[in-house]
């Protein structure tokens, strides 16, 4: 294993740790790690990311299940349109995108470059939410409002967006659950992880027929990330995740700019 590969596996552990500490955000780094450290093409990297994110958040959800920190009704209503969107996007839409999109002067916008540019844009959005870190928690006695149409529409849109980039989308799902359903923050985070695990793993199924999966690499990378989430959960007893969230947001911001510069220039 070369130095970059070793560093890549260390980063896989870091992804899990961040997920365990702050309940989301870490998965946004999976694609850049797979692309720039393991030299996978963006389509394969986003597919692998769905599996890594789905598996890691699944194990992270076990603790939330035990603590009853998941609103299953909201989770299922949100997850169904979300995983339908992810599956359709991964199985049909992504393979249908032409390899060469268009030429701007001497710059050829390819499918791979377009995916990474779009990815960097959503990283900027994720960074904004983490840096702003606006307190969104609601009154514990507030009545939960199940706006079914709103949940279905948001689930489908977020599923589509995150399917293209292979991210979990917790930075979009958590605010939606808090602001629209009035879920308490901790329950919103637990429910978001539950949704992410379902939609990501089902979305990955859409890629299996289109790609040759290196299962040895994918399972080893995922296993290290799962170890990381348990380590992060343990460290959360001593470290306040909220304080780390803003710092991690700045890191994501720098990474998003780096990706944009690398892909465009």
Image (spheres, rainbow, N blue to C red):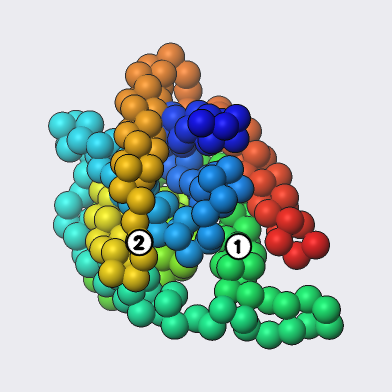
- On the image, the x and y values in percent for residue 19 come to 41, 36
Q: Would you identify the image quadrant in which residue 217 lies? A: top left
Residue at the (38%, 74%) spot, across then down = 89
Of the image marks 2 and 1, the number of the one nearer the N terminus = 1
Which quarter of the figure has residue 81?
bottom left
Task: Please tell me how crowded label 1 is: few (under 14), some (14-19), or many (20+) other residues with Cα within 10 Å.
Answer: many
Residue on which the image places disc 2: 212
Residue beneath the point at 47% across and 51% down:
171
Residue at 72% x, 50% y: name it.
258
In the rendering, which numbered label is found on residue 116?
1
Q: Position of residue 174 (x, y in %)?
A: 40, 51
Does residue 109 lie above or below 264 as drawn? below
In the rendered structure, the answer to whether residue 13 lies left or right of residue 130 reads: left
Specify the quadrant of the image occupied by residue 115. bottom right
- Vertical relation: 246 (above or below) 138: above
Give the number of marks.
Answer: 2
Secondary-structure class at tag 2: loop
**Depth check, front residue: 155 or 17:** 17
- Residue farthest to the right? 105
């Amino acid at each position: 294993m070369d130095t970059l590969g070793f560093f890549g596996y260390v980063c896989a552990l870091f992804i899990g740790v961040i997920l365990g500490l702050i309940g989301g955000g870490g998965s946004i780094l999976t694609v850049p790690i797979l692309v720039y450290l393991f030299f996978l093409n963006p389509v394969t990297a986003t597919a692998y990311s769905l599996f890594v994110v789905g598996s890691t958040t699944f194990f992270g959800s076990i603790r939330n299940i035990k603590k009853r920190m998941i609103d299953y009704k909201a989770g299922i209503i949100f997850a169904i349109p979300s995983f339908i969107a992810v599956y359709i996007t991964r199985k049909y839409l992504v393979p249908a995108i032409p390899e060469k999109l268009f030429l701007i002067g001497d710059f050829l916008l390819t499918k791979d470059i377009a995916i990474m540019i779009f990815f960097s844009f959503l990283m900027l959005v994720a960074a904004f939410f983490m840096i702003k870190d606006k307190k969104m928690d609601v009154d514990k006695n507030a009545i939960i409002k199940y706006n079914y149409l709103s949940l279905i529409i948001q689930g489908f849109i977020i599923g589509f967006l995150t399917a293209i980039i292979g991210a979990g989308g917790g930075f979009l799902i958590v605010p939606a659950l808090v602001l629209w359903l009035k879920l308490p923050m901790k329950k919103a985070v637990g429910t978001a992880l539950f949704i992410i695990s379902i939609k990501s793993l089902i979305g990955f199924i859409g890629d299996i027929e289109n790609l040759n999966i290196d299962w040895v690499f994918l399972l080893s990378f995922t296993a290290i990330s799962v170890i990381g989430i348990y380590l992060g959960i343990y460290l959360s007893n001593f470290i306040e995740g909220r304080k780390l969230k803003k710092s991690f947001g700045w890191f994501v911001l720098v990474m998003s700019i780096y990706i944009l510069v690398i892909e465009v220039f």
